[in-house]
Image (spheres, grey):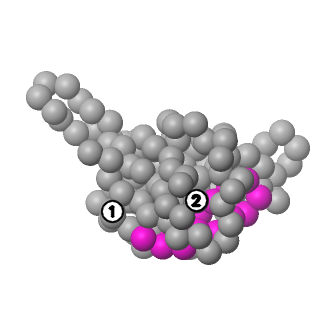
Amino acid sequence: MFGDCVRGEKMVPKLIRVAIPEKQLSWLIELNETETAERVYEALPKESSVEVWGEEIYFPIGVTKGEGDITHEFVAPGDVGYWETEQCVCLFFGPTPESPPGTIKPDDPVVIIGRIISPFGSFKDVTDGDKVIATKEI
């Protein structure tokens, strides 16, 4: 299973943390079992600059999409996606400028690679260019 690792007899989900240290913000993310999620996990740690688009933040990760992974035109609050066009991880908190009323629509379809499992109300303090650090949560 891509999204889990074995600790003793118990399967434990793979977790990552995305943090913006200067603003004391961080989100804990549980990855799913897609090949793309596994590639993101193996690429960590990663330091970059974040971009903001509506109620989405994203940053480059530099991996490619898993061949069999399905993309989605719409996402839900808390979904974490992989945007193939720019090779970015995207955290979705709410509507983007492309979203019809009552939906969240990424610029292009994304592979959903996980979910934010920590409270995420503080994302509105994030601005373009903030330093972001993504790490494995062990």
What is the secondary structure assignment of the residue under circle 2? helix
**Front: mark 1 or 2:** 2
Q: Type of residue at label 2?
A: Lys
2 displayed left or right of 97: left
Residue carrying label 1: 44
Whole-percent x and y of residue 58? 59, 63
Callout count: 2
Q: Type of residue at label 1?
A: Leu
Magenta stretch, main secondary structure class: strand
What span is in magenta?
Answer: 47-60
Asked if one can make out residue 130 in the rendered structure from this viewpoint, the answer is: yes
Work out which residue is located at the far right of the displayed protein and give it: 101
Q: Above or below — where is 83 with respect to 31?
A: below
The one of 63 and 10 positioned closer to us in this rendering: 10
Magenta residue check for 55: yes
Q: On residue 23, which mark appears?
A: 2
